[in-house]
């Protein structure tokens, strides 16, 4: 068996279409939408609406940890855009998200098993899923004789991204998996070297429940994304190999799992 795994696609439809080449099965660990591009501020939903200069100002505030100031600044931009287009906030965002999802799901390889990232909008996925796409969240599937468990979304953070969950809700999904051979999640287990982003210079949220499950049940692999530039891309917990499968938008290369 050969499985290709990606995470943090963030709008890269062309690369996504190629990512399943040579694989028996494809896995996507979420964050399909490109809302904000730190490297290219003219791109993404934010950049397309507000322009590169305004987006760069917003990025600078967030990078400096000034999240309240960033929210106030973006609220002003959103108010202006809503007034200019004669619509409401929800409709404005949904129209842009829908355009991206339409292209991304059409490019998604098959067969594919998917879970949500913290920037995804789960309620919109059914509209775009293709034959051969299976969404799993707090659920287990057998692939090639191995048990794969999936946990989507992120934990509540200062970023206020769309699919953030309180710890009790997230932990319940982790507990529902039981013992698996491969643990697939969007966010990493809560190890400092896996959660610290060396470019953003901050810790992202990792899951203590994922870490506890790994220590207790020792799956072969823990696969995840979320942290784009981690201090360490891999770590070992007992027999479990923990692997950040990479920021797919930047690297355009899937992680290959073979047995």
Image (cartoon, rainbow, N blue to C red):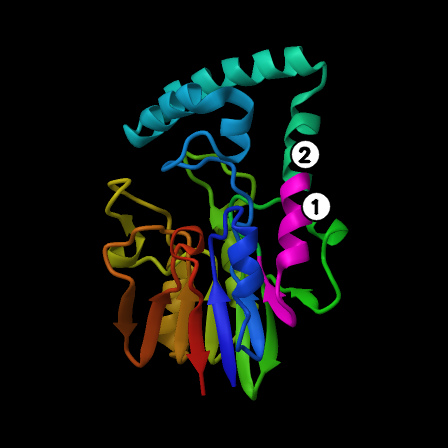
Magenta region, residue range: 99-115
Secondary structure found at label 2: helix
Q: Is residue 72 left or right of residue 106?
A: left
Residue pictured at 27% horizontal, 50% vertical: 196
**Residue 244 lies in what quarter of the image?**
bottom left
- Report the front residue among 42 and 162: 42
Q: Is residue 69 magenta?
A: no
Pick the quarter of the image with the C terminus: bottom left
As drawn, the label of residue 37 is none
Q: Is residue 31 above or below residue 62?
A: below
Give the residue number, with chain letter if any, for mark 2: 94
Residue pictured at 39% horizontal, 51% vertical: 250
- Report the front residue among 94 and 137: 94
Q: Is residue 152 visible?
A: no
Q: Position of residue 83 (x, y in %)?
A: 65, 11
Q: Is residue 101 above or below residue 134?
A: above
Give the residue number, with chain letter if any, for mark 1: 124
Q: Position of residue 58 (x, y in %)?
A: 39, 23
Q: Are the residues flagged by discs 1 and 2 in contact, CB closer than 8 Å?
A: yes
Q: Position of residue 13 (x, y in %)?
A: 57, 52
């Amino acid at each position: 068996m050969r499985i290709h795994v990606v995470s943090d696609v963030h709008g890269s439809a062309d690369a996504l279409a190629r990512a399943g080449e040579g694989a028996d099965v494809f896995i996507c660990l979420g964050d399909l939408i490109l809302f904000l591009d730190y490297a290219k501020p003219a791109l993404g939903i934010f950049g397309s609406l507000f322009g590169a200069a305004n987006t760069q100002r917003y990025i600078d505030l967030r990078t400096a940890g000034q999240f309240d100031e960033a929210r106030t600044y973006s609220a002003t931009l959103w108010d202006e855009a809503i007034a200019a287009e004669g619509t409401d906030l929800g409709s404005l965002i949904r129209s842009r998200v829908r355009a991206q999802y339409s292209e991304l799901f059409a490019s998604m390889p098959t067969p594919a098993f998917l879970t949500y990232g913290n920037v995804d909008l789960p309620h919109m996925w059914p509209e775009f899923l293709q034959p051969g796409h299976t969404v799993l969240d707090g659920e287990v599937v057998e692939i090639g004789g191995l048990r794969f468990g999936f946990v989507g979304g992120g934990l509540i953070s200062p970023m206020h991204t769309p699919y953030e969950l309180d710890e009790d809700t997230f932990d319940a999904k982790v507990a529902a998996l039981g013992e698996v051979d491969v643990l697939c999640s969007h966010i990493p287990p809560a190890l400092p070297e896996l959660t610290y982003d060396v470019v953003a210079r901050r810790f992202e949220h990792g899951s203590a429940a994922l870490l506890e499950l790994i220590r207790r049940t020792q799956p072969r692999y823990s696969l995840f994304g979320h942290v784009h530039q981690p201090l360490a891309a891999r770590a070992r917990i007992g027999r479990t190999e923990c692997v950040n499968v990479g920021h797919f938008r930047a690297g355009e290369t899937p992680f290959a799992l073979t047995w």
